[in-house]
Image (cartoon, rainbow, N blue to C red):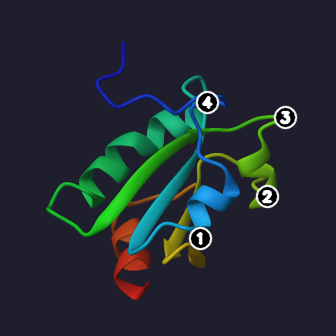
Amino acid sequence: MSHFKPYLSKNESPSRTDVEALRGLTLLEFGTDWCGHCRAAQPLIAQALATPTKWQHFKIEDGPGHALGRSYRVKLWPTMVLLRDGQEVGRLVRPAAAQDIESAMSKS
């Protein structure tokens, strides 16, 4: 069993309207618990978010029929969409290092 928090299911995920209404900095992480790339990225994401940050982090389960992932045109997992006040300001697909995530967060 993973010690990382689980992805929000299709029924638990916020709507696109809810996400666009979010204020401040938000990191949407799209993926699944069974995805090898997603599992490999968990320590990197945890490291990038280890220090106190202003970023809200939502793990969103993605797949066919998942409206939020489709609205962001997610094709590969994990995909991380960085938002400022509900608007996309950056994106990472299959990050290879915590530094990649930290760099994207610092630029946004």
What separation in Å lies between label 2 and label 4 (alpha carbons)? 20 Å
> Circle 3 sits in a helix, a strand or a loop, which is it?
loop
> Circle 1 sits in a helix, a strand or a loop, which is it?
strand
* Residue picked out by circle 2: 71
* Residue picked out by circle 4: 35
* Residue picked out by circle 1: 91
- Identify whether 29 is placed above or below 55: above
Q: Where is residue 45 shown, x and y percent of the image?
A: 36, 52
Q: Amino acid at mark 2?
A: Ser
Q: Residue at x 39, y 72 (%)?
A: 25
Q: Farthest residue toward the right?
A: 65
Label whose residue precedes the other's in the sequence (2 or 3) = 3
Label whose residue precedes the other's in the sequence (4 or 1) = 4
Q: Amino acid at mark 4?
A: Cys
- Identify whether 78 is placed above or below 6: below
Q: Quadrant of the C terminus?
A: bottom left
* Residue picked out by circle 3: 64
Label whose residue precedes the other's in the sequence (3 or 1) = 3
Label whose residue precedes the other's in the sequence (2 or 1) = 2
What separation in Å lies between label 4 and label 1 (alpha carbons)? 19 Å
Q: Amino acid at mark 1?
A: Arg
Q: Residue at x 35, y 51 (%)?
A: 44
Residue 93 in view in this figure: no
Disc 3: CA contacts within 10 A as few (<14), some (14-19) or many (>=20): few
